Amino acid sequence: MLIILSGLPGTGKSTLARELARRLGGVYLRVDTVEAALLNAGHTSMTVEGYATAYAIAADNLSLGLSVVADCVNPVSETREAWAEVARQSYAALVNVEVICSDGIEPRRRVEARYADPATRAGKWSPPNWEDVEKWAYQPWQTSVLLVDTAHETGAELANTILDFVRN
């Protein structure tokens, strides 16, 4: 099974993805981590290469029979279709989850705290600042997606919702 958690920075994707991977005994695949490694290794571009690397890592793990939980912004139809192709080629079920946080303050607080933390700014990669997030071009979904909101439920509660959805 390939579970893709998509959404803007600060929505709570990473917390939820780690919880799902832990419960499934699966692979946690964070595109930010891949992109940071590429930049820190000297690559000057990261988005296309980062996603391409993540697709390959996901396919390798799906071929081993492992569930993969991918944590990424996944803002455009091209990346969404590429993840769907990984699932098709791996004969894996695909679950698209869009993560939002309807609390008007919390996503900004999360983004600003992460951006200000020196530990997240090691090397050449750094998380986006709030102004970058506000300008992000995030396309509406054109395919079926499970929408979850981190504003009123914990990661554990939302993990239950997603796993119940997968089982039904």
Image: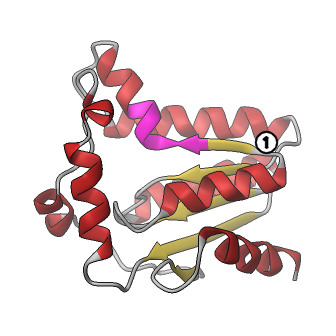
Residue 147: image x %, image y %? 55, 83
What residue do we see at 34% from left, 60% from top?
Answer: 9
Question: What's the coloring here?
Answer: secondary structure
Q: Is residue 34 magenta?
A: yes
Q: Residues within 10 Å of mark 1 (few under 14, many from 20)?
A: many
22 is higher (above) or lower (below) than 103 = above
Q: Main secondary structure of the magenta part?
A: helix
Q: Quadrant of residue 11?
A: bottom left
Q: Amino acid at mark 1?
A: Leu
Q: Is residue 138 visible?
A: no
Return the x and y of residue 90 as percentages of the image width and height.
Answer: 78, 46
The structure residue drawn at horizontal position 78% and vertical position 80%, both measured from the top left corner, is 165
Instruction: Point out the stretch of residues depicted in magenta.
Output: 29-35
Question: In this orientation, does residue 34 appear?
Answer: yes
Circle 1 residue: 62
Number of numbered discs on residues:
1
Give the residue drawn at x 11%, y 61%: 131
The image quadrant that residue 153 belongs to is bottom right
Residue depicted at x 31% and y 18%:
40
